[in-house]
Image (cartoon, rainbow, N blue to C red):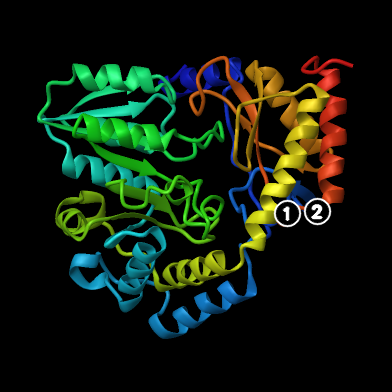
Amino acid sequence: MSFFNEKLSHLKEHHLYRELTSFSSFQGPRVTIDGKDIILMGSNNYLGLNNDPRINDAAKEAIDTYGTGSGGSRLTTGSSTLHSQLESRIAEFKGTEAALVFNTGYMANIGILSAICDKHWTLLSDKLNHASLVDGWKLTDASCYRYKHTNMEDLEKKLKGSKSKYKMIVTDGVFSMDGTLAPLNTIVDLAQSYNAMTLVDDAHGVGVLGANGSGTIRHFGLSHAIDLQVGTLSKAIPSVGGYVAGTKETIDYLKNTARSFIFSTALPAASLATALKAIDIIETEDFRRQELMKKTKTFKKQLIDMGFKLTHTETPILPVLIGDPNKTLMLSQRLMEDGIFIPAIRPPSVPRGSSRLRISMMATHLDSDLNYVLQRMQIHGRALGIIGD
C-alpha cells in the first residue's frame, strides 16, 4: 500500500475523510446539488448578498471596463484604480488611515505575520485561532505562545513571561468554528499594559456586527485601539480577497515586505467592484443584520429547547456539538437525504472530541425552511442518540 493510500485509509477509518460538494447554482438559502433542490445551512453568505442584482451589475460593468484579468502583481503591472478605491473604502469602513488588499484572507495573515515578526518578537495567539494565523506564525522566527481560548488570565501570564523586545496579541474577532467573540476590551487593556501590538482577524464579524456592519472592532468601540484589522471579502461581502487595515506607515511597510502580496497576481476588477458595491449596501441596509440576528436568536433557542448542545455563540454561526465524528457525519448525511445541507466539521478543523454540525444562518432563509430543518434535526438527533425523546 502506498504512502497516500495508507494516509487516506486512516482518515476513512476514523471518519475524518472529506469530499467536495459541488453546487450548480449560486449560494442562496436554497441551492442545487446533483440536480436536487437543497436548503443550504452552511454558507458564510450571512446577509444573502450573493447574486444581488446591484452587485452583479457592478461586476459586469467592471469587466466591460477592465477585462477579466489583472495582468500582473500590484507592484509590476497589475494595480488598477479599483484597487486604490477599494483600499480607501475599506479604510473608511474600518475607521483606519489606510488598507491593503490581498488575494485571500489566508494570504493576508501569513503575509502580515511573516513580514513583521522576526526573532525579536513574541506572538501570543488564541488556541482556537484560524489556521491562517497559525500558519502565519509558523513562517516567522518569533517565539509563539498559544493561550487558552479567550482566557485573559492565561494571556496575561504569558505576556508577563515574555522577555522579547516586541510582542503581538493575535486573535480572531469571531471564532469561525465556535461563533464566540474575543474579549477585545480586555485584550486591548492588556496590550497597552504590556506594550504589545494587536492583530484581529474579523473575517466573520464584518457585515454581522457593529453599528454599520464594519465588524467586531466597531462592536466593541475599539476602532482606534486595534493596530491591525484583517478580514476577507468572501463572506458577508460576496466576493473574493482579503485585506489589512491600519496606519499609513504600517500599510506602506507591508506593501513593500509582505511576500504573499508582492508575488501574487492582483485580484481582477470584477472581484474589486463586487466588494465595493457590497460595502455600500452593508453600511446602508441595516435591516439585513436585524433580520439575520432575529432568525439566529429564534433558531438557536429552538435547537437548545430540543436538547442539542451548542457553544456560547453570539453570532449567526451555530455549532451543534456532537463529539463523535461518526455520529456527526451520519447526522449530516441523513439531513442531506432530506434535502438539507449542514457540513460536518471534524478534526483537524476543530479539536478532537469536538466534532460538530456548523450551521450558518442567512438573513434570507425562509421561516418555513427553518422549521423543516428543525423538524428533521429533531427526528435524526433522537434516532442517533444525540438528544433524548
As shown in the figure, which amino acid type bears the numbered disc 2?
Leu
Q: How far apart are marks 1 and 2 (CA)?
A: 8 Å
In this rendering, would 228 be left or right of 2?
left
Residue at left offset 74%, top offset 31% = 333
Residue 162 visible? The answer is yes
Residue at left offset 11%, top offset 29% = 119
Name the quadrant containing residue 312. top right
| Marks 1 & 2, CB-CB < 8 Å contact | yes
Whichever of labels 1 and 2 marks the residue nearer the N terminus, that label is 1
Q: Percent x, y for residue 84?
A: 30, 72
Q: Which residue is tagged 1?
A: 29
Q: Which residue is tagged 2?
A: 366
**Is 289 drawn above or below residue 149 in the view shown?**
below
Between 126 and 274, the residue placed more toward the observer is: 126
Q: Percent x, y for residue 226?
A: 31, 46
As shown in the figure, which amino acid type bears the numbered disc 1?
Pro
In this rendering, would 234 be left or right of 314?
left
Name the quadrant containing residue 308. top right
Q: Is mark 1 on a helix, strand or loop?
A: loop
**Is 254 drawn above or below residue 88 in the view shown?**
above
Disc tally is: 2
Which numbered disc covers residue 69?
none
